[in-house]
Image (spheres, helix red, strand yellow):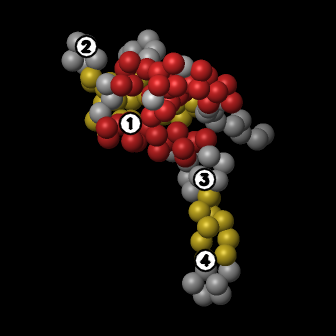
């Protein structure tokens, strides 16, 4: 029996999101993005005013869990530490870029070039 494809991936933030009560939330889950996930932020007035805000809206849509929080909002993503934001942007790119899972390598003996699969975060 063939394994089902994985659509959600666990992660652990390097620093963690600190909520209003001082609780640090580090463990979360990010799902693969849909076309609508990438289209929706373009309609957001905050993104229209500042293109850099796109990543804030996008991440709030694809992070399905963060610690014990009921949901992740753009306002919460605004409060992420820079190291956590960079980590999540990199994870998003790895999960959603079809080429990110492969690295082109060259055999040192014969010079043959081929693609080698890079293990995805969270397994599989």
In the displayed structure, 43 sits above or below 29; it is above
Q: Is residue 46 above or below residue 117?
A: above
Disc 1 versus disc 3: nearer the observer = 1
Residue that mark 4 sits on? 106
Q: State the image quarter where residue 11 is shown.
A: top left
Which disc is residue 22 wearing? Answer: none
At x 67%, y 71%, the residue is: 114
Q: Is residue 59 among what the camera can see?
A: no
In terms of sequence position, does the residue under pointer 2 or pointer 4 come before the other? 2
Q: Give me the residue at 61% from left, 77% from top.
A: 106
Q: Secondary structure at mark 4?
A: strand
Query: Marks 4 and 2: in contact by CB < 8 Å?
Result: no
C-alpha separation, residue under disc 4 versus residue under disc 1: 33 Å
| First in sequence: mark 3 vs mark 4 | 3
The dot on residue 101 is 3
Marks 4, 1: nearer the viewer: 1
Quarter of the image containing the N terminus?
A: top right
Earlier in the chain: of badge 1 and badge 2, it is 2
113 sits left or right of 88 in the view? right
User: Which residue is at a point 59% across and 21% down the rendered structure image?
Assistant: 43
Distance from disc 1 to disc 3, alpha carbons, whole Å, reads 21 Å
Q: Which mark is residue 85?
A: 1
Residue under numbered circle 2: 20
Q: CA distance from mark 2 to mark 4?
A: 50 Å
Q: Which sits in the foreground, 116 or 37?
A: 37
| Spatial separation of the CA atoms under disc 1 and disc 2 | 18 Å
Dot 3 or dot 2: first in sequence order is 2
Q: In whole angstroms, how far apart are the C-alphas of marks 3 and 4?
A: 17 Å
- Residue 35 visible, this orientation: yes
């Amino acid at each position: 029996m063939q394994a089902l494809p994985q659509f959600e991936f666990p992660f652990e933030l390097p620093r963690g999101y600190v909520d209003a009560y001082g609780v640090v939330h580090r463990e979360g889950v990010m799902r693969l993005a849909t076309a609508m996930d990438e289209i929706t932020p373009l309609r957001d007035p905050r993104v229209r005013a500042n293109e850099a805000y796109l990543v804030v809206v996008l991440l709030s849509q694809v992070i399905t869990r963060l610690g014990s929080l009921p949901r992740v909002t753009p306002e919460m993503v605004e409060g992420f530490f820079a190291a956590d934001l960079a980590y999540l942007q990199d994870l998003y790119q790895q999960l959603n870029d079809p080429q990110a899972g492969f690295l082109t390598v060259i055999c040192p003996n014969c010079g043959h070039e081929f693609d080698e699969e890079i293990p995805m975060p969270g397994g599989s």
